[in-house]
Image (tube, rainbow, N blue to C red):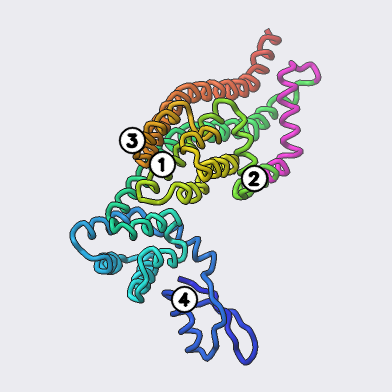
Amino acid sequence: MRYQVRALSAGRLVTLDVDALHEEDAARQVRERGLEPVASRLRNQAQGFRAKRFPLLLFSQELLALLSAGLGLVEALEGITEKEHRDDVRLVLQGVLDALYRGQNLSAALEQAGGAFPALYVSTVRASEKTGDLPQALLRYIGYEQQVEVLKKKLVAASIYPVLLMSVGGLVVLFLLGYVVPRFAGIYTDLGNDQPWMLKVVLTWAGFIEAYGQPLLLLAIAAIIGTAYAFSRPKIRAHVGTFLWRIPMLGEQMRVFQLARFYRTLGMLLAGGIPVLQAMGMAKGLLAAAFHQRLGMAATLIREGRAISDAMEAADLVTPVSLRMLRVGEKSGDMGRMMEHVAALHDEEIARWLEWFTRLFEPLLMIFIGLVIGGVVLMLYMPIFELAGSLQ
């Protein structure tokens, strides 16, 4: 891991970047250079890199398999570290092992691992340390991640074909309008003033492309780059999300998708023994900003003694079916499992809606692109037919 260390050198404060296994190792390296460390912290870039590249699901599956085979925690982690061939992943695992060697528990070691392990994972492990069922906690988290991954794959699979169709269709239309139409216009330039109206459209467009083609191309490239940058900003994405929420059918499905993630996470945490209010606080980050106020309202009602189902209903965080399921869960005393059932119900609803939407949207999209391309081709060839008719 990469640490940024501030140290004293001859009475001056300097900043150093140090590759180290943990904070104590970074301080030791600085002292070996003859400097006195004052403060150190992980670099944000390194944190983001670790969080992005660390194979969390694979690590959890391997650790679960070794623990189930009877190995101890340290021995299992040593085995995973020894077989790891990627230097960045090995460095994270070695840092976790060093923390365990120093007597820290696993949750604290994971928390210090430079952002490789999300807070949800760390909290799940911390809750299991109180009950001693780390393999069961890992099994729940693996199931949670696999279910989330299945839903993500369904969303990606449903969007690939429409995006590909729009991209190819858009490129074909741009090629026709930007290259083919101006070349055809050269054929019609010597026909005088007695021109069909569609030919005038072709010639006007060709003149516009000839005069402003390069500025338009640069403007299009700038627009693409600007759009990509804008969507990388959280505030812009929040505004776009707010706009999409207002679309009746799409907004409702986005709400169901948010509730599915929320209840799946909440159910896993409750099954792991985490109190409901703490679990709701941890699951807050999975909800869109529009839901944060509602979640705070539900937490306040639960803190005041209201039932979970009543609090969720008052905060508009349920559907009619999920509300009845939560009430059944309260009567049975197994809210964690019932919330997982609620999430599965919402996932099935989203899958059905995606299948219906793609079956309807894809043919409509193909018809629209076909009409646009057909209109351009008609605009090119109709002048030829009109001229042939006038000659006859």
Task: Give the magenta-colored segment's residue range.
Answer: 193-218
Q: Nearer the viewer, residue 316 or 50?
A: 316
Query: Could you tell me if the residues under marks 1 and 2 are in contact, i.e. CB atoms within 8 Å?
Result: no
Instruction: Give residue 256's position: percent from left, percent from top.
Output: 49, 33
Depth check, mark 1 against mark 2: the one in front is: 1
The residue identified by callout 3 is: 332
Marks 4 and 2, the one that precedes in the sequence: 4
Query: Could you tell me if the residues under marks 4 and 2 are in contact, i.e. CB atoms within 8 Å?
Result: no
Instruction: Give residue 176's position: percent from left, percent from top.
Output: 61, 30
Using the numbered discs, state the Cα–Cα distance from disc 1 to disc 4 in whole angstroms.
Answer: 35 Å
Residue 385, by quadrant, is top right
Outermost residue toward the right in this view: 193
Q: Amino acid at mark 2?
A: Ile
The residue identified by callout 1 is: 264
The residue identified by callout 2 is: 236
- The answer to whether residue 93 is above or below residue 352 is below
Instruction: Give residue 270's position: percent from left, percent from top.
Output: 39, 46
